[in-house]
Image: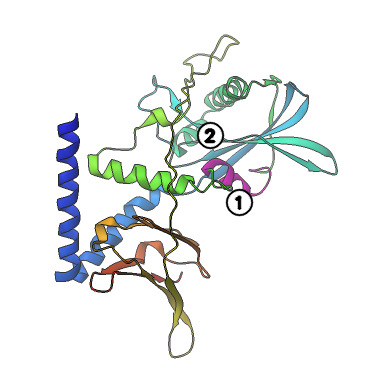
Amino acid sequence: MESSSKGLLTQVTQFWNLLDDLAESNPESYEKFIQQQLKEGKQLCAAPEPQLCLQTRILKPKEKILFINLCQWKRIPAPQSATHPVPLRVGRPEDMSETSGVYTVIDVAYHPDVLQAAEKDQVKKDQLIQMTMKCIEEKLQFTLSNSYHVTKFRIKGSVHRMKQNLMGIQTDPTDLREKMRKELTLEQIRSSTVSNSDQFPQLLLPKDEVSSKTRCLIEEISSTEIEVEMKRPAYELKIVADQNEKPLKIELKVELPGINSVSLCDLSVSEDDLLIEVSEYRLHLNLPESVDTEMTTAKFIKEKATLIVTMPLV
């Protein structure tokens, strides 16, 4: 295992060295390659989207109205087959209040194929909902009412809150975006598909009608992460406009003293923010305008140890 890991690391190092050479010898081909990688990674890094909302009741430990937001998320692996468990992610329960009273909201995410299949078959839809409720009961130690109804709205609460809940990016500096980038890198290196389902709790949909004996199969994976103090590098961010002062793109220059290769730079760009991690440096910026992630390019100037990221506006 150790020798294979070293061999893999050697291949990765060689690959990044080739990219460095390509960036210098053929910038056009390098930009095309980076754009293709960003395009392929966009699907994996897509945010969850609301699909439908259920209303039921928590009976224990404290009686309360419960809304369950069922969301589709391409980040969740699709089930391997009809007989395999269905991966899902259950968000943290959040208590909210309105003039009508206090209620709880729980966000649950599945791969889009799972919810789309359920929408086409009412029996499968009911099975999925019942199993979702059973999974919530076992994971959160709740007792829920057996009855529910689908609301007229697709989500309870804001979409922004739901994304924060499922993606885990509240105030924790080690957010899911970072985890997703690391996992994506490993998957690209191993040339494997997104089937790493042991990172997600799982439930098994029954072939027949759901009974009270049906159980939710959940696997909890715990991990520890080493926290390293990261320095904020010096940078310059500006909006480039045309002759008519129409904004065209955002250009970011980041000074990274001691860094001599683009292979060391870990860059993630979304429509409204950017994250760079390299060695002891970490830079997270909220962008002033929405950018086109597919057309975003990055170039590293070795002589100046400077990373230049060009982000066309949407």
Residue 11 x %, y %: 15, 46
Callout 2 crowding tier (Cα within 10 Å): few <14, some 14–19, many ≥20: some
- What amino acid type should be assigned to the residue bearing mark 1? His
Side (left or right) of 19 relative to 149: left
User: Mark 1 — residue?
Assistant: 160
- Helix, strand or loop at mark 1: helix
The residue at which mark 2 appears reads as 119
Q: Residues within 10 Å of mark 1 (few under 14, many from 20)?
A: few
Relative placement, left or right, of 23 versus 43 is left
CA distance for labels 1 and 2: 24 Å
Q: Amino acid at mark 2?
A: Glu
Q: Where residue 209 sits: x, y (%)?
A: 54, 14
Nearest to the eye among marks 1 and 2: give it.
1
Rendered position, 310 above or below 46: below
Image coordinates for residue 158, horizontal then vertical, percent: 65, 49
Viewer-side residue, 77 vs 60: 60
- Give x and y (percent) for residue 57: 73, 26
Queried whether the magenta region covers residue 157, the answer comes back as: yes
Q: Is residue 208 visible?
A: yes
Q: Which residues are magenta?
A: 155-167
Residue 271 visible here: no
Quadrant where the N terminus lies?
top left
Q: Residue at x 69, y 30 (%)?
A: 149
Element type where label 2 sits in the image: helix
Residue 209 vs residue 105, the one in the foreground = 105
Contact check, label 1 and label 2, Cβ < 8 Å: no
Q: Nearer the viewer, residue 298 or 115?
A: 298
Q: Residue furthest right?
A: 99
In reply to whether residue 186 is colored magenta, the answer given is no
Dividing the picture into quadrants, the one containing residue 261 is bottom left
Name the residue at 34% across, 66% down. 256
